[in-house]
Image (cartoon, rainbow, N blue to C red):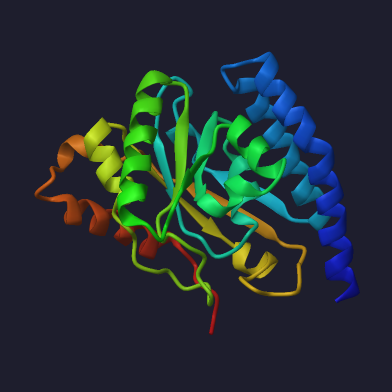
């Protein structure tokens, strides 16, 4: 338990150090590229402090000049720094609205290009996704990361995918890139009080073309993507 709180305390200090740099970077460079790079350094620091390594497979499936909706499974808080550090392309994440109101931290997330959604208000969530679509259309260099299950899995098992990412893909024509995260549940499980030194692997699969689907076959889009995760995800043994 002492080891856990020591790591959490060190991460908190590191986060406090990084926050003003991310916010200042957004002021200096309105495009958000510099803020994103500082955000990636934050992620690197969190992983180093926790002795968690990240291995990436399939980086060649991401074109630096293209825009994507990157969807991932979600079993641990370490999914966030793993994705942020492992995928170098400029991207923002879809985060819960509550984080927006955390002093300084919420500002830094905004500066780094993340979006906030109210999971409990369906109408507000749809309105936010419309705003996300507009912003992504305005900035073609900015990709989006969405945890398709909506929240972390308690037991590390793959959950059903929500439709938001797929609706956004169909509405904007932006391809979905499945990224399977393996090993994060071992680093720290939801509500767990232990952080374990381990290796998280990211498997980046080829982009899925939304033109192969329509609003009528949207559910098939969801199921085809979920099947890829079932094939590649290594769930922890119960």
Drawn side of residue 31 relative to residue 186, left or right: left
Res 182 quadrant in image: bottom right
Rendered position, 232 above or below 213? below
Which residue is at a point 52% across and 72% down the rendered structure image? 156
Which residue is at a point 59% across and 23% down the rendered structure image? 32
Rendered position, 14 above or below 77? above
What percent of the width, then of the height, locates residue 184? Answer: 61, 62
Placement of the N terminus among the 4 image quadrants: bottom right
Rendered position, 226 above or below 3? above
Drawn side of residue 134 relative to residue 74, left or right: left
Which residue is at a point 39% across and 34% down the rendered structure image? 132
Label total for image? 0
Drawn side of residue 108 relative to residue 70, left or right: right
What percent of the width, then of the height, locates residue 155? Answer: 53, 77
What percent of the width, then of the height, locates residue 120? Answer: 40, 61
Res 110 quadrant in image: top right
Rendered position, 173 above or below 176? above
Furthest toward the left, the residue is 216
Furthest toward the bottom, the residue is 238
Drawn side of residue 215 relative to residue 38, left or right: left
Q: Nearer the viewer, residue 217 or 164?
A: 164
What percent of the width, then of the height, locates residue 180? Answer: 47, 54
Which residue is at a point 61% across and 47% down the rendered structure image? 101
Res 67 quadrant in image: top left
């Amino acid at each position: 338990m002492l080891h856990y709180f020591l790591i959490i305390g060190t991460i908190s200090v590191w986060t406090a150090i990084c926050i003003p740099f991310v916010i200042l970077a957004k002021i200096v460079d309105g495009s958000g590229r510099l803020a994103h790079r500082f955000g990636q350094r934050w992620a690197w620091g969190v992983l180093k402090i926790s002795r968690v390594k990240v291995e990436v497979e399939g980086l060649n499936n991401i074109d630096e000049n293209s825009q994507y909706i990157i969807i991932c499974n979600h079993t641990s808080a370490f999914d966030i720094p793993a994705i942020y550090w492992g995928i170098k392309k400029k991207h923002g994440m879809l985060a819960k609205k509550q984080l927006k109101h955390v002093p300084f931290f919420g500002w830094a997330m905004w500066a780094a290009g993340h979006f906030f959604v109210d999971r409990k208000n369906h109408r507000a969530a749809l309105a936010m996704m419309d705003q996300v679509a507009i912003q992504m259309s305005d900035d073609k260099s900015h990709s989006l990361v969405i945890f398709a299950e909506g929240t972390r899995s308690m037991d590390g098992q793959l959950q059903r995918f929500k439709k938001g990412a797929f609706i956004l893909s169909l509405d904007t024509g932006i391809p979905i890139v499945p990224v399977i995260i393996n090993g994060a549940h071992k680093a720290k499980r939801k509500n767990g009080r232990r952080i374990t030194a381990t290796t998280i692997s990211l498997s980046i699969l080829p982009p899925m073309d939304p033109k192969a689907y329509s609003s009528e076959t949207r559910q098939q889009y969801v199921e085809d993507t979920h099947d890829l995760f079932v094939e590649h995800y290594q769930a922890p043994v119960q």
